[in-house]
Structure formats: C-alpha cells, structure tokens
Image (cartoon, grey):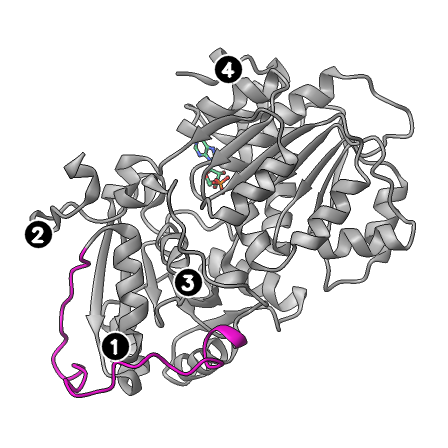
Amino acid sequence: MSFNSLGLSDALLKAISKKGYTTPSPIQQKAIPPILEGKDVLASAQTGTGKTAGFTLPILQILSQGQQLRQRPIRALILTPTRELAAQILANIKEYSVFLDLKSTVIFGGVNQNPQVTQLRQGVDILVATPGRLIDLQNQGLISLAKVEILVLDEADRMLDMGFVRDIERIIKVLPTKRQNLMFSATFSTDIKKLAMGILHHPVHVEATPENTTVDAITQIIYPVAKEKKTELIIKLITEGNWKQILVFTRTKQGANKLTESMISAGIKAAAIHGNKGQGARTKALAGFKDGSLTALVATDIAARGLDIPLLPHVVNFELPNIPEDYVHRIGRTGRAGANGEAISLFSPDETVFLRDIEKLVGLNLPKENIKGFEPDPNASKEPIKQGQGRQQRDSTPRKPKTDTTNRSSNNSFGPRRPSQNNDRRSKR
Ligand code: AMP
C-alpha cells in the first residue's frame, strides 16, 4: 500500500516524501482512513509503530480542508503525558504541515509559561499539550477550547498511570460535545476501557503490532547478576563491547543519577534524563545522545516516553521495571525500522517478582546467561525491594501497576524466535 491510496492531499504527500517515508506503517494504513471519514478511533499502538503520523496526517488534512477562521481558534487538541512526547509530536506536525497554512504549538510544564501564552494569543489551529499545563493556563483564562473539533489522547495508558485522569475529565468538560475523538494506548486495562467508553462514540478499533521484522530483530537476553555488581557489569559491557549508543533504564531518578556518575568516573560519556532535570538539561542530554557526543543516556521510564531516537542498537535494563508493560516499552526502543537490536536486562535476585510478571506478560521464558564473575549468590534473597525503594520514587506518581492485558495480544509477539521459546502463546493458537 502507498500513501497515495490513503486519500491524503498532495501537500501532505509532498511532506511525507520529503520526510523519506515510502510506505505507510500498519497503524497508519488502518487508522488514517477512518479518521479522514470523521470517525472516532480507538487505537492500540505503542511508540515506534508510526502512530504519531497515524493521527497527525489525517488531522492536518481535515483541518486544511475545513473552514479557516481568522482568529485561528484551537481546532485540534492533542493531549500527551510528557513534555518530550509533546515536543516530538509538535516537531512531526511542523514537518508534515510544511506545505499547509496551519499553525501549531506546544505547551507543557516545567518552563516559563509566557512564551507559550504569546504563541497561543497569536492563534493556533493545533495545540499539543500535557494536561497539567493546559489546566493551569485554562484556570488563568489564557486559553479557549470552545472551538475544538478533534481531540487526541495519546499514550492514554501512560496518562492514567501518571494520575492525569481528573485533569483529562476537566479538560473534556470544557470541549464542545460535538467533536471527533481519537485515543491511542499501548495497553488496555479496565481503567483505559472505562475512559474510552466515556469519551469515544462508536469508535473504530484499530490495532498495530510492531512490524514483524522489527520484533524479530530484537534479541532479548537476561544476565543474572549480583545486585552490587550491576554497575561494574554494565561498564564492562559498554567498554569491552565498544558500544557507541546505549539507552539505559533505571527504576528511579536517584538510581539514574548514581549510575550516570559511576559511568562518567569510568570514562563513559553519559547523562541522565528524568523528571528532576530541567527542560534545558533534558534537551541537551537528548541532543548529545543523538549526535553521538554521549555514549549512554540513562533514563527513567517516564522520562524516556516519547523520545524519538531511531535505530538504537542497545537498550539495557539496568533495573527491571516493576510495571511489566514498561519492559515492552523499553525494549521497543531497539530493533526499530528493521535494524538489529539487543535488549539486555541485568537481573538481580530481588527482582525475581518483576521478571516473573514480565515473562507472564510477554508470554516467553526469556533466555538467561550467566557472566563469569558476576553471578548472583544462589542464596541471595528473592524478596522484592521494599516498597518505597522502587515505585514511590519513580519519576511520577503512578497508580497501581496494570496487569489487565486482555487486549494486549501484540505483546505475545515480543521476543526472539528461538526454538527454546515455543511457549510463545501465538504458536498455540
Ligand atoms: P512513532 O511511533 O510515531 O513514535 O514513530 C516512530 C518513528 O517512525 C519516527 O521516527 C517516525 O518519524 C518514523 N515513521 C513514522 N511513519 C513512518 C513511515 N511510514 N515510514 C518510515 N518511518 C516512519
């Protein structure tokens, strides 16, 4: 299938071609036509599937064909959980709308609101926002959402995890009731379904599993390791493997800082990215990582959301996530766009419960390999770390882990095709 056959305008096709895309991704093939028809859409898709273009391209087409008001009221509102993701979506919109007369901007917290307010005053057709800052500006009477025609909830599951449900409800109350609603989520818990039912009207359901080539290209490996030897091991892996670009995940902000300091002491160019870092530091770290001046970017799950870093060869879980879905998000950072990728997890005995939950979710027994000199003590406690060491210090105030994965059939497809892994649930269907 080509982009031409999706019914997109010449201006958009030109922008797509300028961006170098030749074929629409599965989520784009499935989501663009119903969105163009004005239908509500509930999409199951995670970062890396091309979901952003899946909703921004048809929105741009609809808005460019609709009636343009002189004051440019906000006609499309895209809500997203993190500032990085918001900035990334805006960057995409700008690229796709380069041949259109549409204005777009982004608002998020953690930075001075004045430049954002100035932009809003000048009139924008499309607003990308994190819920907190949007409510803030709305409370101050600085923003009007009375003319919104299209609402997008991107990464809806993550917004719920971050406790944005009340904010979302408050925002929806001030929107016109007649509007088109699009909701994207990687997971479908009971809470997400409830939210969707309250917002969407007769939605078309679309689902995108990451492309098989991409999934096949991810090699997952677990290194059992004594907790106190994790830092030494990751430094050894990076230096001996001569790795050039590695994204490392920790569970906590403190963990990210500590590991980054150890890496720097070992001569590895590293930076941490998490919610306690100012926007400037985060942007700088990301830019350094992208241009190759940094070897390692150490991130918490929340901070990593929405980071658009294509073709990552290595993703390392320095600590396993306590929310199993985060594992899937993390490893989705490698093996993108057909490139080979390796997702490595350093697993200490106290994370036994986390690993069990992850393996249950992905439907695989992940391959484990001991590294000589780093093996954990077989008698070490398998008790999880105490409450407070993990979840309470995460990069947000998340709610209970979501384990309702009824609709997550796509998760079963994560994992290397190895003969030992014929417990992949898909093969039993
Ligand atoms: P997303 O899932 O929206 O975060 O997109 C993941 C990456 O895929 C981004 O770097 C996009 O620029 C890229 N992308 C989106 N659509 C396509 C496409 N049709 N062909 C190639 N790359 C794409």
Residue 385 in the image, given as x and y percentages of width and height: 37, 81
How many C-alpha atoms fall within 10 Å of the one at disc 2: few (<14), some, or many (≥20)? few
Q: Main secondary structure of the magenta part?
A: loop
- Tell me: 245 left or right of 421: right
**What residue do we see at 62% from left, 59% from top?**
163
Mark closer to the observer (2, 1): 2
Say which quadrant the C terminus sits in.
top left
Left or right: where 30 falls relative to 328: right
Callout 4 environment at 10 Å: few (<14), some (14 to 19), or many (20+)? some
The numbered mark, 3 or 2, whose residue comes first in the sequence reads: 3
Residue range corresponding to the magenta coloring: 365-392
* Marks 2 and 4, the one that precedes in the sequence: 4
358 left or right of 394 in image: left
Relative to 212, is 264 on the left or the right? right
| Residue 212, placed above or below residue 10 | below
Identify the residue position indicated by label 3 in the image: 323
Q: CA distance from mark 2 to mark 1?
A: 28 Å
Residue 242, position as x, y percentages in the image = 27, 67
For badge 4, the amino acid type reads Leu
Helix or strand or loop: what does disc 1 sit on? Answer: helix
Q: Which mark is residue 420?
A: 2
Is residue 300 a member of the stretch shown in magenta?
no
- How far apart are the two marked residues, 3 and 4, measured between alpha carbons? 37 Å
Can you identify the residue that label 4 sits on? 6
The disc labelled 3 sits on which kind of residue?
Answer: Ile
Measuring from the top left, give residue 138's x and y in whole percent. 85, 50
Provide the residue designation for mark 1. Answer: 236
Residue 19 visible here? yes
| Residue 288 in view here | no
